[in-house]
Image (spheres, rainbow, N blue to C red):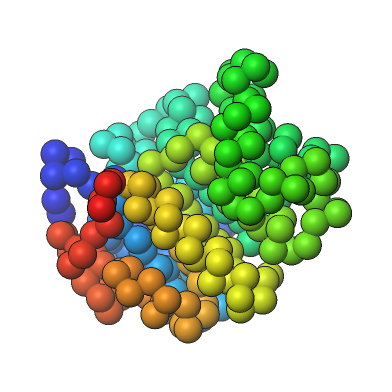
Amino acid sequence: MTSANDGEIVQFDNVGLRYGTDREVLSDVSFTLYPGSFYFLTGASGAGKTSLLKLLYLAQRPSRGAIRMFGSDVITMPRARLPLLRRRLGVVFQDFRLVPHLSAFDNVALPLRVAGAAERDLAKPVADMLEWVGLTERMHAQPAQLSGGEQQRVAIARAVIARPEMLVADEPTGNVDPDMAIKLLRLFEALNRLGTTVVVATHDVHLLKKVPDSLIMRLDKGRLSDPTGALRYPPRRPFMRGG
């Protein structure tokens, strides 16, 4: 595979994952992700998409194989260092995972507060982010007062408020109508054009054509295939900062 000096953001090398003594849910998975590209991860329900994403956002360690992220060996890294690495990632969950007693504003501000930002420095970036996702007028609403699409947009704003180098989204359009799904994809595209690597897991094959320059990785029973050359560098037309 390519060396770390060639600009990759993630490397998986013959990764396998099993839970307990069950059969592997991921087998011999190898790929490289590069900065500024947009990837779809697709496959049928049960193919292993969520398990692969858990490895990507460092919620799970593999049973075997090697993973490097941002030039660091994730397998041998002490657990105490993982939170610093996670701050370079943004994650959008299918079930939103908003804090129910916090407003939209406070949910989006949460990553900045965790990182130690001063309260006086929160108002503008959080307000700007909520404006970006079209929720300025809903910033004081709690999650129970928001529609599914609004909750997903809050989740996206929270995931990207700290300007992550990579965004990972697990079925982000699964709980919204088709029109909202397209709007969410456009938000991911806009973020990608600013230079963030984007990985969107979806079982909806119709979405794949909505981002023409995206690259597709397909999982089938825990094994990865490469229908658009996503695993080779350079991508045909990568999105790059300022592009």
Q: Examine the rendered structure and indicate whether residue 183 appears above or below residue 53.
A: below
> How many numbered marks appear?
0
Q: Is residue 155 left or right of residue 196?
A: right
State the image coordinates of residue 184 (x, y, percent, origin top left): 55, 63
Q: Residue at x 28, y 46 (%)?
A: 241
Q: Examine the rendered structure and indicate whether residue 9 appears above or below residue 177.
A: above
Question: Is residue 205 at all visible to an observer of this figure?
Answer: yes
Q: Residue at x 58, y 42 (%)?
A: 129
Q: Residue at x 74, y 63 (%)?
A: 148
Closer to the camera, 88 or 3?
A: 88
Q: Is residue 230 left or right of residue 174?
A: left
Q: Examine the rendered structure and indicate whether residue 174 appears above or below residue 240.
A: below
Q: Quadrant of residue 128?
A: top right
Q: Examine the rendered structure and indicate whether residue 158 appears above or below residue 218.
A: above
Quarter of the image that includes the N terminus? bottom left
Q: Quadrant of residue 115?
A: top right
Closer to the camera, 32 or 107?
A: 107
State the image coordinates of residue 226 (x, y, percent, origin top left): 27, 74
Closer to the camera, 57 or 189?
A: 189
